[in-house]
């Protein structure tokens, strides 16, 4: 539906989608009729419904974001020994990522839906 017309452009509302956009008059096409508009609205509504169903609050289908890195404790002895500081940082990061990897692998097995196929994000 055309909402407003300017010199060489207009504002068009896309029925069924609910958004409007400024477009050039030269790019407009004739309407395909009421039946085509109804099909388009129904298609949008069914796609929207599927998206909403996909946003389930079921814990088995949710994804928990990874926690941020905890702050690194400051020790004055590290300031005088850069090699020790680098070694401790590597050890700290290795432990963090080992735990993160283990928790993600555990989570993927824990939430297996049992469908036996790739039907869910967590399978």
Image (spheres, grey):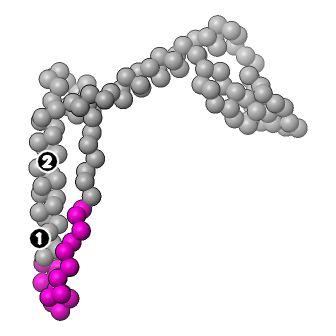
Residue 83 shows in this picture: no
| Residue appearing at x 73%, y 29% in the figure | 12
**Front in this rendered view, residue 101 or 61:** 61
Q: Which residues are magenta?
A: 69-87
Check the image and report above or below for 60 versus 106: above
Query: On the image, numbered disc 2 is attached to which residue?
Result: 103
| Residue appearing at x 77%, y 25% in the figure | 2
Left/right of residue 90 with respect to residue 27 in the rendered view? left
Query: On the image, numbered disc 1 is attached to which residue?
Result: 91
SS state under label 1: helix
Number of other residues with Cα within 10 Å of mark 1, as a class: few under 14, some 14 to 19, many 20 or more:
few
Task: Quote the CA–CA distance across marks 2 and 1.
Answer: 18 Å
Number of other residues with Cα within 10 Å of mark 2, as a class: few under 14, some 14 to 19, many 20 or more:
few
Q: Earlier in the sequence, mark 2 or mark 1?
A: 1
Q: Quadrant of the N terminus?
A: top right
Residue 63 shows in this picture: yes
Q: Position of residue 25 (x, y in %)?
A: 80, 32
Q: Quadrant of the C terminus?
A: top left
| Residue appearing at x 69%, y 35% in the figure | 21
């Amino acid at each position: 539906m055309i909402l407003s017309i300017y010199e060489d452009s207009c504002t068009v509302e896309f029925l069924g989608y609910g958004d409007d956009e400024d477009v050039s008059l030269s790019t407009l096409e004739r309407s395909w009729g009421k039946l085509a508009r109804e099909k388009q609205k129904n298609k949008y509504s069914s796609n929207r419904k599927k998206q909403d169903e996909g946003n389930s609050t079921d814990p088995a289908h949710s994804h928990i974001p990874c926690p941020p890195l905890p702050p690194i404790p400051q020790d004055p002895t590290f300031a005088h020994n850069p090699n020790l500081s680098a070694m401790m940082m590597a050890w700290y990061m290795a432990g963090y990522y080992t735990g993160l990897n283990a928790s993600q692998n555990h989570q993927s097995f824990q939430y297996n839906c049992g469908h036996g196929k790739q039907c869910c994000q967590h399978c």
